[in-house]
Image (tube, helix red, strand yellow):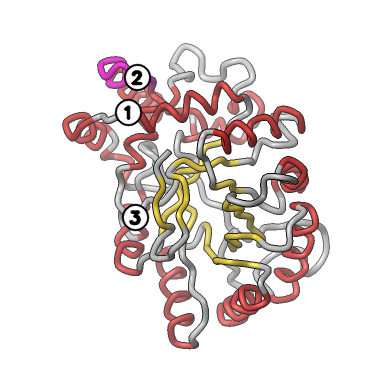
Amino acid sequence: MRYRRLGGSGLEVSVLGLGTNAFGKRADQEESARIIHHAIDRGVNFIDTANIYAGSESERIIGEALADKRHGVVLATKAGLVNGEGPNTKGSSRYHLMQELDRSLKRLQTDYVDLYQIHTFDPHTPLEETLRTLDDMIRSGKVRYIGASNYAAWELMKALGISDMRGLNRYVSIQTSYSLADRTPEQEIVPLCLDQGVGIIPYFPLAGGILTGKYSFADRAPLNSRAQTDLNFGRFINDRTLELSESVSRLAEDSGCTPSTLSLAWLMEQPAVSTVIVGATRTEQLDENLKCLELNPGRNVLNKLDGISEAFRYGRPFATYRLS
């Protein structure tokens, strides 16, 4: 396993991280625990979850699986998206964040999280309120580092400016959709992160499975695929993305690897990327993803990938999550 510092911080994270959105949903508790232990045994130290994943089941499952393995794991969770009905059940207010952190700590069976992330920008709460709350969490010992997710470049820069001006702990990372099928972060987020020392944590690195090669023009929704289990995902399956998938698959075949490993290897070479979170519903799937660490595609292949995905630098992001 290779490790990198998370942005400008001193925290080292595995270049491949474990995403746990499927735990408690597409992977039951037993299989999820098996995946977690399998990942740790292979050097993965970054585990990412959120308070809302699988109705909070993901955090609970992780807490039980890490009961005797918490030491050495960089545990990351998030809050800010809707997590209930009524007022104060979403956003980045002091009220909501402190309540959600305590609930997450209880489910995760730990007294601290290594990286606490704001799941999305809250237009209704002053940034200074959010950042002072996060600073207090760090000072209390319940949080080690803080990060953002789904922030626009101007929102992230404003937050960093306030932290610097007020002497508060600043965001060390940002999660954003980033892949060969979504290179929009290269317009503003990547240059900002390079300038400010913020680490990028891409989510949807395989574009929800599109870059695995399992979708085709002949069969746009294979059995048990995300497109079949999540009807909203179907909007991403179109002629443009399928053409990209086939191009990546041909290049992967020429390189003697799978489209997944080639796509992940490309993403790991991008500036400012600290760790790439990839989900898994089986240990075999995790092993396949780990093969990207052994792959050295070379500049010629990376340049070809740049070329076939150039059009995906522009337009709307593949995915983003915002409060209404």
Spot occupied by residue 28 in the image (x, y as percentages of width and height): 75, 30
| Mark 2 or mark 3: whose residue is earlier in sequence | 2
117, 122: nearer the viewer: 117
Please, what is the three-letter code of the amino acid marked with disc 1?
A: Leu
Q: Quadrant of the C terminus?
A: bottom right
Residue 26: where, in percent of width, then height?
70, 30
Which three-letter amino acid code belongs to the residue tagged 2?
Cys
In percent of the image, x 73 and y 34: which residue is there?
25
Farthest-out residue, right: 86
User: On the image, which quarter does residue 263 sit in?
Assistant: top left
Specify few, some or many for label 1: CA neighbours under 10 Å numbering under 14, 14-19, or 20 or more: some
Q: Earlier in the sequence, mark 1 or mark 2?
A: 2
Check residue 295 in the rendering and tell me which mark sits there, or answer none.
1
Disc 1 versus disc 2: distance between alpha carbons?
A: 8 Å
Name the foreground residue: 52 vs 272. Answer: 272
**Are discs 1 and 2 less than 8 Å apart at CB?**
yes
Q: Is there a contact, CB below 8 Å, between mark 2 and mark 3?
A: no
Residue under label 2, please give it: 257
In the rendered view, does 235 fall on the left or right side of 96?
left
User: What range is drawn magenta here?
Assistant: 251-258
Q: Residue at x 55, y 24 (%)?
A: 285
Report which residue position mark 3 lands on: 272
Indicate whether 251 appears above or below 85.
Answer: above
Q: Tell me what residue is drawn at x 49 percent, y 40 percent.
A: 204
Q: x, y (%) of residue 323?
A: 62, 60
- Indicate the quadrant where residue 233 lies: top right
Whether residue 3 is in magenta: the answer is no
Tell me: residue 190, above or below residue 249: below
- Secondary element at image label 2: loop
Please name whichever residue, 88 or 22, is drawn nearer the observer in this view of the structure.
22
Residue 246 horizontal side relative to residue 34, left or right: left
| Dot placed on the residue nearer the N-terminal end, 1 or 3 | 3
